[in-house]
Image (cartoon, rainbow, N blue to C red):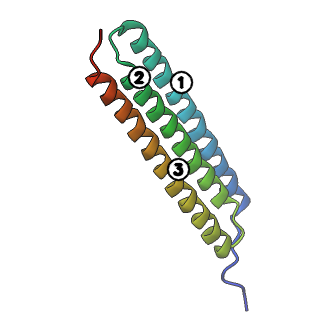
Amino acid sequence: MTDQTHFELPPEMRSMAETSFKQARDAFEKLLGNAQAAAGSLEEHGATMRAGAKDLSTKALSFAEANVQAALNYAQSLVHAKDLSEVMRLHGEYVQAQMKALADQAGEMGQIVHRAAMDATTPKH
């Protein structure tokens, strides 16, 4: 009898998957660089941009980067999984880590929005 919970990706498929992950990472890094350049350009040309909006966009960009990196790392770890139990363990760890990260991120975004609202309603002398 064969162990049906054990599986192995053929070397060609593993190589193709790793190449795809590398291309996805490279494309993401290029996109991120372009987004950061655009955000910098907006800052230079938009002198009236409020500090709260800047903080919010900076945080959103950093959270997006972290979440995409986590997803890419998770997907790549699945390529190297040796059996179904490892896939399930990796999935559980990823979901748990992402739920915590999303809760933390939501809290930080809420604080930034609260600060910006307080700044907007505080009279300037």
Secondary structure type for disc 2: helix
User: Above or below — where is 125 with respect to 55?
Assistant: above
Q: Which of 16 and 78 is in front in this view?
A: 78
User: Above or below — where is 92 with respect to 23?
Assistant: below
Please tell me in which quadrant of the rendered image residue 19 appears.
Answer: top right
* Number of other residues with Cα within 10 Å of mark 2, as a class: few under 14, some 14 to 19, many 20 or more: some
> Where residue 89 sits in the image (x, y, percent)?
64, 69
Type of amino acid under label 3: Ala
Residue appearing at x 59%, y 55% in the figure = 75
Type of amino acid under label 1: Gly
Q: Point out the tag, 1 or 3, that comes first from the N-terminus.
A: 1
Q: Work out how far the residue at label 1 is from the one at label 2, CA to CA, in angstroms.
A: 17 Å
Q: Nearer the viewer, residue 17 or 38?
A: 38
User: Above or below — where is 89 with respect to 19?
Assistant: below
Residue designated by label 2 = 54
> Where residue 73 sits in the image (x, y, percent)?
63, 50
Secondary structure type for disc 3: helix
- Position of 11 with respect to 90 (left or right) is right
Q: Point out the tag, 1 or 2, that comes first from the N-terminus.
A: 1
**Cβ atoms at labels 1 and 2 below 8 Å apart:** no
Residue 101's disc number: 3
Residue appearing at x 73%, y 58% in the figure = 11
Query: Residue placed farthest to the bottom in the image?
Result: 1
Q: Work out how far the residue at label 3 is from the one at label 2, CA to CA, in angstroms.
A: 21 Å
Q: Which of 75 and 70 is in front in this view?
A: 70
Please tell me in which quadrant of the rendered image residue 48 appears.
Answer: top left
Residue designated by label 1 = 33
**Callout in the foreground (1, 3):** 3
